[in-house]
Image: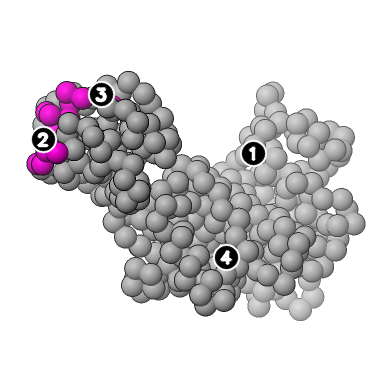
Amino acid sequence: MVLPDSRQSAIRNNYSFLIDSSKSVMANASLQQFPTRPSAHANRIDRLRIRHLRLLDLIARTGSLTASADALRISQPAVTKMLQELEQAFACTLVERTTRGGQLTTAGERALERLRMSLGALDAACEALATEPEIPLVRMGVLPLVGVHVLPKLFAVLQQQSQLPRLCVYENTVNGLFELLARGELDCMIGRLEATPKASMQEQMEIVPLRDEYLAIACAPDHPLARRRGLTLSVLREHAWILPPRGTHTRAVFEQPFLDQGQLPPTPYIESISFHSNLSMVAQSRFLTVAPESAVQHYADMSMVHKIRLRTPFASGRMVFIAHKDALQSPAVALVAKALAEQWRMPM
């Protein structure tokens, strides 16, 4: 979203803390360290406009100064001048010019990691004030399975307390949510960690464990396997499957026990990333599918599917709440985090 100059000026006055935050990080000094009389370096940063900061993000996305100029609706010479001003303000090279366009240097990447949070917070401020500014806005990313079990309970608790903020909920994969969070387009997310978080992420994010989420196998209520107990993997291999695509967390967790026993995992007849669709198809067919246990139980409670009893259950994944530490300064985001922690009795 590119704002007109008049809107940028107003927002800069109203939300100067965003720019101040970026200055303190990039100048590697706290506000208390600035001398009473502004230095030349501080003056150069003060002259930056919001579009200077957005330019770095556009170059990272497009890899082209020309495309960045088009997005900002200015000429290429003007973009070149803006980049020079940006690099002079931060006293380092942020973009390496190439014959193909421009590529961020290591310094540019580190700068953008911080600036994206400020830009995302600025966009969120605009969105929050556009309608019903008296109600706080929280931009939350979730995995699809969260909508079945976690969100309804969260909303019910907050509504009973008369503290439900205005929520923008975005569904995506784990990797997709982390990308949105890193770009500052989300305040928080409910998902899982598939690997140890990077040190830079641990510095910027607050990670709160919520619960373990197991996988379960589902079939139609009248499927032959519905009446059997203690099923083994070799028996499951003999049946037709609907599975999520390769590369997804669920598919990897599902296939690992077969591989550990020296068996080839089942080859699915249908691949679909939506466990809602998969469970609905299984309910009307002789296929099997794998999905989060909370989702399988939800459909089983409606008598649509049957949860198959296995001899050895599939592994679990830890559900977590993740938020920018800066975002937790918002009372609304902190309220969501507290409600989630209390729901599973985890200390904040």
Q: Position of residue 188 (x, y in %)?
A: 52, 59
Q: Look at the numbered disc 2 and give the secondary structure of its residue.
A: loop
Kindly identify the amino acid type of the residue bearing the numbered disc 1: Ala
Image coordinates of residue 37 in percent, x first then y, are: 79, 75
* Residue 114: image location, x then y, percent: 60, 55
**Location of residue 164 by image quarter:** bottom right
Q: Residue 313 sits in which quadrant?
A: top left
Asked whether, in this view, residue 267 is left or right of residue 28, the answer is left
- Kind of residue at disc 3: Ala
Mark 3 surroundings: few (<14), some (14-19) or many (≥20) residues within 10 A: some
Amino acid of disc 2: Thr
Is residue 337 visible to us here?
no
Quick one: label 3 or label 1, which is nearer the N terminus? Answer: 1
Using the image as rendered, state which of residue 234 and residue 305 is in the foreground.
305
Q: Residue furthest right?
A: 6
Report the residue marked by disc 4: 327
Question: Whole-Å distance between the Cαs marked 3 and 2?
Answer: 15 Å
Up the image or down, 37 lies above or below 5; here it is below
